[in-house]
Amino acid sequence: MNSFAKIAGIIFSLIVVVFAANVVAAQEEFTLKGDRKPGTKFRSIDAVSPIPFDKTYDELTEQQKEVFRATYGGLAENEKPPFPKTGVQAIYKPIIKGHKEIARAGNLFLVAMIDEKGKVESVSVYESPATSMTEYATTVLFNTDFEPATCSGKPCKMEFPFEFDLRHYEKEKKGLLNN
């Protein structure tokens, strides 16, 4: 084997290793754990996300920010999207709690318009499994404090998308005959 082939083989191997490392890093998932099931020490996984639930936007890594920014498609480098002040758990936790009561399967997709002060001006509902879930989720968004978006370093109005698959839960059945 000549030296060119050896070098090419080494370079190819390095590219494969770097690519594999990037794929693993890109697949990092964070979980939001729920209550323990009776009779076990294990907690259910209520939600999974490529970004941490308990971090503010500024606490996210650059890669996590890129994942979140990608949902906007075309966000300029000098623009920062709005984000819940205490992380996305401020939205997920109450919606999960409400969904345990409402228990209607389906996708929930909402877009909140966040003003320059970080307040929700309006919520558009694009998909929801039930009217009761729509009302509940809209209320959750209106009660969430956001860091406002910034455009060229100044606070600006911008949309905040929220999508969550609500197929995970069944309403708890209560009574002697329900097993």
Image (spheres, rainbow, N blue to C red):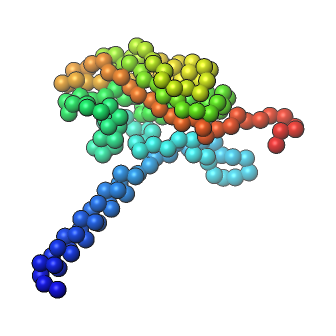
Q: Residue at x 80, y 34 (%)?
A: 174
Taking the spot 20% from the left edge, 33% from the top edge, the residue there is 77
Viewer can see residue 57:
no
Quadrant where the C terminus lies? Answer: top right
Residue 95 coordinates in the image, percent (x, y): 56, 29
The reply to whether residue 81 is visible in this rendering is yes
119 lies above or below 178 = above
Q: Would residue 48 appear left or right of 75 to someone viewing this image?
A: right
Q: Residue at x 42, y 21 (%)?
A: 112
Residue farthest top in this picture: 121
Q: Return the x and y of residue 83 as percentages of the image width and height.
A: 37, 29
- How many numbered tags mark residues here? 0
Residue at point 62% right, 33% down? 105
Q: Position of residue 22 (x, y in %)?
A: 31, 56
Say which quadrant the N terminus sits in. bottom left
Q: Residue furthest right?
A: 177
Classify residue 91 as left or right of residue 70: right
Between 62 and 58, which is closer to the camera in this rendering? 62
User: In which image quadrant can residue 97 be found?
Assistant: top right
Q: Nearer the viewer, residue 165 or 100?
A: 165
